[in-house]
Amino acid sequence: MSLNDPLSNVLSHIQNSEQLGRKEVVTKNTSNVIKKVLEIMQDKGYIGSFEEIEDTKGNLLKINLLGRINKTGVIKPRFQIKKTEIEKFEKRYLPAKNFGIIILSTNKGIIIHNEAKEKGIGGKLLSFCY
């Protein structure tokens, strides 16, 4: 069976493991986008450290969980937004102002919505976490 959206699979695996109270997750998906999203989540304190484990069938990601994620997921369809529309999607996907992050893919790299507002750039929505 093929995976249609690897980022969605990793975030739902993290969400399910958080709800079960697990301390770590091992997943087979190891793309650069997934690693960058996990780095952002780690910088903001939602997950602990993560490491890539080399395997004969493909690499694995081992993610340490801190128990701080209430909800995480991808945003489908991946809306193309302007710098003026960030506030609208922040209200749609986050429960309160300045609570949680929305991760965007921009021409300056993968960043969170607050940085995009400061830099005055738009992009495509990838995921949210709070």
Image: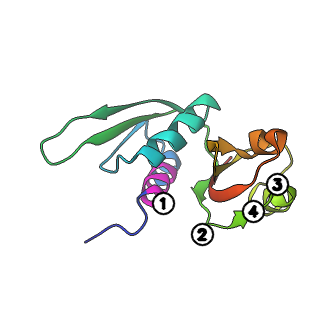
**Label 2: which residue?**
76
Mark 4 near mark 3, Cβ–Cβ under 8 Å? yes
Magenta-colored stretch includes residue 8: yes
Q: Is residue 81 left or right of residue 107?
A: right
Amino acid at dot 1: Ser
Of the residues tagged 2 and 3, which is closer to the observer? 3
- Please report the bounds of the magenta region as a residue range: 7-15
Q: Is residue 19 magenta?
A: no
Looking at the image, what colour scheme do you see? rainbow
Q: Earlier in the sequence, mark 4 or mark 2?
A: 2
Q: Which class describes the residues within 10 Å of circle 1: few (<14), some (14-19), or many (20+)?
A: some
Cα distance, mark 2 to mark 3?
Answer: 19 Å
- Disc 2 from disc 1: Cα separation: 10 Å
Q: Main secondary structure of the magenta part?
A: helix
Residue type, mark 2 in image: Lys
Dots 2, 1 in contact, CB < 8 A:
yes
Marker disc for residue 81: 4
Marks 1 and 4, how far apart at CA? 20 Å
Q: Is residue 67 visible?
A: no
Q: Say which element carries label 4.
A: strand
Q: Residues within 10 Å of mark 2 (few under 14, many from 20)?
A: few
CA gap between label 4 and label 3 equals: 7 Å
Residue beneath disc 1 = 8
Q: CA distance from mark 3 to mark 1?
A: 25 Å
Give the quarter of the figure containing the N terminus: bottom left
Q: What residue lies at 77% left-to-right and 49% top-to-bottom?
A: 121
Kindly identify which residue carries mark 3: 83
Kindly check if marks 4 and 2 are in contact, taking CB atoms under 8 A apart as contact: no
